[in-house]
């Protein structure tokens, strides 16, 4: 009996996405080994954060790096850094931010649930329309930074990031890119900061497959230095966002693994899964299965879109999504609407694509 079984909880096969509510991703053996080893001894934690940061910075071609307790924590710390780096005297008194620079500019359509982390610092959002003019008009002496949420939220009409960065530079303003789920490609670890963004934030527990409660803050050294004084083991706004020695060593191992990984082979695996599912499911009456691209958070990997005819099957797509989860084994698939769902190979362990196919064949026969 597993520890999950003992709690009456069934493991789930994840054909959905790197969702926190499912546990994000699975840590590979290299990561688990690094965490296990780290658990064997005490260590100088601030020094470890510094050395791990230096190593991750070198690997990701950034000036500096810091391990956060997730990308959302990174969003909060980055917003803080945007004020603290030119007001180091504030330190623990950070809640007085309202008297300093307390405005973060954001494109209106990029507002999202994770951006609450910016407001947790006491900062407020100034929403802009997607024009360079609107951006210029919004900048004033209270502006601390510009936030950019990369991925599906970026509107076609939004001023391109490169231009946002150029305008920000005219005013010596930092641009922070939340790129939590923008891996693959691995090159994104240096792309945004290479374009001139001050900081880029990534989840350690999504496709990197590091520990779930980790994230990376990559970019300017002066900004990363500014948050150390308010972060673990020091007191201040960052103190509740603790990262342990096991997580630091685990995410470092995850970054090393990710940069050495054969991403072309991984993409080929995803294409093979989608082709196999399509070939197996398309002959079924009332079912159409097609390759869809890019996937959930705009990652450049294929997934499979399945359209069902509820009339033929006697069940809607959302009823099927629930049935997958109630099945044995339980499978989580991506719900779209009443007639569509998606299967994502990105989060599968090799071999599970067959289990997913067989579950589909069992459930989708009308
Ligand atoms: C997933 C995600 C986050 C949160 O990341 P965590 O590592 O779970 O804290 C933040 N922003 C965006 C855009 C995300 O997709």
Image (cartoon, rainbow, N blue to C red):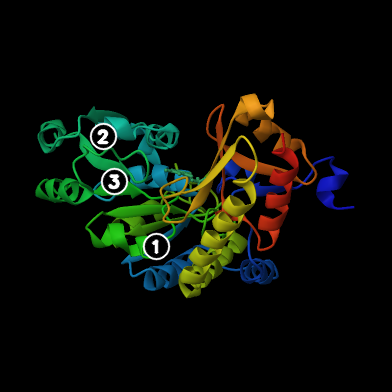
Q: Is residue 237 visible?
A: yes
The answer to which of marks 3 and 1 sits earlier in the sequence is: 1
Does dot 1 land on a helix, a strand or a loop? strand
- Drawn side of residue 339 relative to residue 353, left or right: left
| Separation (CA) of disc 2 from disc 3 | 18 Å
- Drawn side of residue 24 relative to residue 161, left or right: right
Cβ–Cβ below 8 Å for labels 3 and 1?
A: no
Q: Residue at x 53, y 71 (%)?
A: 257
Image quadrant assignment for residue 44: bottom right
Percent across and percent down for residue 309 are: 59, 30
Residue under pointer 1: 65
Q: Residues within 10 Å of mark 2 (few under 14, many from 20)?
A: many
Image quadrant assignment for residue 236: top left
Residue 252, above or below 146: below
Residue under pointer 2: 107
| Separation (CA) of disc 3 from disc 1 | 15 Å
């Amino acid at each position: 009996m597993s520890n999950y079984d003992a709690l009456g909880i069934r493991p789930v096969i994840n054909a959905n996405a790197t969702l926190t509510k499912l546990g994000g991703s699975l840590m590979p053996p290299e990561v688990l080994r690094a965490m296990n080893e780290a658990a064997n001894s005490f260590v100088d934690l601030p020094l470890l954060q510094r050395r791990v940061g230096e190593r991750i910075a070198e690997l990701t071609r950034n000036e500096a790096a810091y391990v956060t307790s997730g990308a959302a924590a990174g969003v909060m710390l980055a917003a803080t850094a945007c004020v603290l780096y030119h007001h180091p005297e504030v330190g623990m008194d950070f809640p007085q931010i309202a008297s300093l620079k307390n405005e973060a500019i954001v494109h209106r359509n990029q507002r999202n649930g994770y951006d609450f982390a910016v407001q947790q610092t006491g900062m407020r959002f100034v929403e802009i329309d997607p024009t360079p003019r609107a951006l210029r008009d919004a900048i004033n002496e209270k502006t601390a930074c510009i936030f950019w949420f990369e991925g599906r939220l970026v509107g076609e009409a939004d001023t391109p990031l490169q231009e946002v960065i150029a305008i920000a530079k005219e005013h010596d303003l930092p641009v922070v890119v939340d790129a939590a789920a923008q891996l693959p490609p691995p090159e994104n670890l240096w792309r945004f900061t290479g374009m001139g963004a001050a900081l880029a934030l990534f989840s350690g527990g999504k496709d990197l497959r590091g520990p779930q409660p980790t994230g990376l803050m990559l970019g300017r050294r002066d900004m990363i230095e500014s948050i150390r004084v308010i972060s673990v083991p020091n007191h201040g706004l960052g103190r509740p966002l603790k990262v342990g020695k096991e997580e630091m060593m685990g995410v470092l191992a995850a970054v090393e693994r990710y940069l050495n990984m054969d991403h072309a082979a991984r993409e080929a695996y995803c294409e093979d899964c989608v082709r196999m599912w399509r070939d197996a499911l398309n002959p079924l009456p009332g079912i159409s299965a097609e390759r869809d691209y890019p996937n959930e958070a705009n990652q450049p990997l294929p997934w499979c879109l399945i359209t069902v005819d509820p009339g033929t099957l006697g069940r809607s797509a959302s009823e099927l999504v629930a049935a997958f989860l109630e099945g044995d084994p339980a499978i989580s698939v991506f719900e779209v609407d009443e007639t569509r769902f998606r299967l994502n190979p990105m989060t599968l362990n090799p071999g599970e694509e067959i289990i997913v196919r067989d579950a589909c064949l069992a459930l989708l026969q009308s």
